[in-house]
Amino acid sequence: MASSLTRSRSLIQKLRSKLSVLHQLNYYANSSRNFLVNLTFSPQIIKNKNTFFVSRNFESTIAQNQLDFVSADNDNQDLDFPGGKVGITSQMRFISETNGSRVECYRALDDDGQLLKESKQVDEELAVKMYEYMVTLQEMDTIFFEAQRQGRISFYLTTMGEEAINIASAAALSIDDLIFPQYREPGLLLWRGFTLQDFANQCFGNKADNGKGRQMPIHYGSNKLNYITVSSTVATQLLHAVGAAYSLKMDNKNACTITFFGDGGTSTGDFHAALNFAAVLEAPVIFFCRNNGWAISTPVSDQLRGDGVVVRGQAYGIRSIRVDGNDALAIFNAVREARRMAVIEKRPILIEALTYRAGHHSTSDDSTKYRLVEEIERWSKTRGPVLRFKKWIDGNGWWNDKRDSELRSSVRKQLIHAIQVAENLEKPPVSELFSDVYDVLPPNLHEQERSLTETIIKHRKDYPTNVPVQSIT
Ligand SMILES: Cc1ncc(C[n+]2csc(CCOP(=O)(O)OP(=O)(O)O)c2C)c(N)n1
């Protein structure tokens, strides 16, 4: 009896070690906390009542090293916890809530557009292209904002003050990298080839709009350009970006994901869940926080006024950096390096860009009701990112005022033309309101479509004439 028990035990032992699942079996049976530990083993076996599922998982590139690390000067006085070895001490010492000094902000250009010592720079061709796109974005914001004020579109939201974040990060990425935007990052889409006409079509919700006119203006998206459609529910995109990054890792793709969010978004549960998952899964995702000082009328919280964003990244075990969000060169350098680390080292990275939202939150907002006009002017007139970058390329002899005004006037003309075309294009047919969700329309939706169509046909003069309606049976 005893020997048969011993034989069985030894067999189980061998089987377990062959599959390298000893830890998994124990940990899975016990608690979800151990999910973190499981990721350091491969392959991963999940024990079910009757079956073993083998899921695709990965050798950890980072966590195992951290778990094995024990300080050299502790004379092997360490404890071997399931979560890894740790040195021991007889001193009762609480870890301070701060590091003592503020986390520095990385810059490459000073306020006057002078290159800081030893800063990496880009060549003339790329610098001029970046500047031209920042100017195009500025002009696009001005003209669409006015179009909304004239009642031609229902809503708009500008990137004013955050042009460098938009364009410099786009320039540092590769087209295969998936972008999960909040809503203040159309510049990345512009950089990737979304035309001014495409932007106008979306804002006017006409039949050429990728979203078939179903969304409010500024909810752009493009499959072709790897730009996931904007969703105005703050911070949900962070989780999507982590999931997609993990999938890129599973497929061993030479790409990462990047997701943008404001300082307000960091107060959501999704922010924490996303950072946690990214750290645990070692997902190649770049979290890009635009800390622009305001979440509509709510100023940056006290926590974020300190080192809240970067230190939270660190707390989750994510390599993090703080960057001057009004310095296009610094953003380019930081995103380029973040991308390299995410793609090559398969790890998440967090970037916090300090900036200022120089426009209103959106056309539904009047920011002069909650902040001083002088504050807005100081940031937009003297500290804006486009002006600073212009000073740098001017100083290099790569740009001049004549080219500047020619560019601005040409972009304005293109925009006015795009708006006229978009405005005159028919809207998507009413039937499109009901398509693309169900393969076969359920009876209740079929009934709603019939009822809506009949109502529009009966009261034609009360509905826009450029929305095609076809009576249905
Ligand atoms: C989950 C959720 N909560 C609240 C809102 C309403 N809302 C829209 S924008 C916004 C402020 C977001 O501020 P921030 O994340 O700092 O981005 P910013 O607008 O400054 O770029 C809020 C609260 C929302 N859209 N989604």
Image (cartoon, helix red, strand yellow):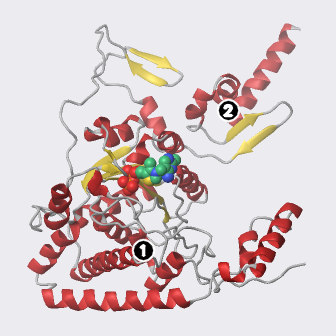
Q: Is residue 21 left or right of residue 341?
A: right
Q: Amino acid at mark 1?
A: Gln
Q: Amino acid at mark 2?
A: Val
Q: Could you tell me which secondary element the residue under label 1 belongs to?
A: helix
Quarter of the image that includes the C terminus: bottom right
Find residue 431 and report its horizontal and vertical position in percent: 75, 76
Residue depicted at 16% across the width and 85% down the height: 399
Residue 342, above or below 453:
above
Count of residue discs: 2
Quarter holding residue 168: bottom left
Q: Nearer the viewer, residue 458 or 64?
A: 458
Sequence-first tag of 2 and 1: 2
Find residue 209 and report its horizontal and vertical position in percent: 58, 79
Residue 385, above or below 129:
above
Residue 246, above or below 171:
above
Ligand 1 near label 2 (Cβ, under 8 Å)?
A: no
Find residue 460 and report its horizontal and vertical position in percent: 71, 82
Residue 138 can be seen in this image = yes
Find residue 130 and report its horizontal and vertical position in percent: 29, 76
Work out how far the residue at label 2 is from the one at label 1, CA to CA, in angstroms: 60 Å
User: Which residue is disc 2 drawn over?
Assistant: 21
User: Which residue is disc 1 drawn over?
Assistant: 148
Q: Is residue 56 left or right of residue 306?
A: right
Residue depicted at 13% across the width and 73% down the height: 392
